[in-house]
Image (spheres, grey):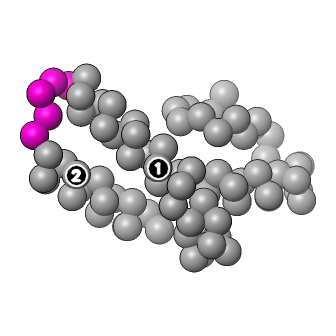
Amino acid sequence: MVGRCNGRGADVLRTTRFDSTADLATTLHRDANIDNHAIPQRALGHVAPVQALAEWREKRPDLLISVIDNLTGLDS
């Protein structure tokens, strides 16, 4: 799972010329969002990682103490 995500990121970095660091940051955040929210993973039962986390939280709330808010960035 991580290898594919890293491979997609490496492809974007290798094939895209960025006009600024802000453009690069925007692209990386967008791609991370796509990886976490839109691409189903076979290892997770063909759901996206955020969907899997939400399902796990419903089944075993004692295992996940952070709120899953579907936003990219650091956990609070």
Q: Which mark is residue 34?
A: 1
Magenta region: 17-21
Q: Which mark is residue 12?
A: 2
Q: Earlier in the sequence, mark 2 or mark 1?
A: 2
Query: Percent x, y for residue 23?
Result: 24, 28
Residue at horizontal 62 percent and vertical 72 percent from the top: 46
Residue 28 is inside the magenta segment: no
Residue at horizontal 46 percent and vertical 49 percent from the top: 34
Query: Looking at this view, is 39 or 65 the one in front?
Result: 39
Query: Percent x, y for residue 40?
Result: 56, 66
Q: Quadrant of the C terminus?
A: top right
Q: Quadrant of residue 53?
A: bottom right
Q: How many marks?
A: 2
Q: Crowdedness of circle 2 by 10 Å Cα count: few (<14), some, many (20+)?
A: some
- Three-letter amino acid code at disc 1? Ile
Q: Main secondary structure of the magenta part?
A: loop
Query: Is 3 drawn above or below residue 51 in the view shown?
Result: below
Q: Are marks 2 and 1 in contact (CB under 8 Å)?
A: no
Query: Is 38 drawn above or below residue 32 in the view shown?
Result: below
Query: Percent x, y for residue 37?
Result: 56, 50
Residue at horizontal 70 percent and vertical 35 percent from the top: 69
Secondary structure at badge 1 equals helix
Secondary structure at badge 2 equals helix
- Three-letter amino acid code at disc 2? Val
Q: Crowdedness of circle 1 by 10 Å Cα count: few (<14), some, many (20+)?
A: some
C-alpha distance separating marks 2 and 1: 13 Å
Residue at horizontal 10 percent and vertical 40 percent from the top: 17
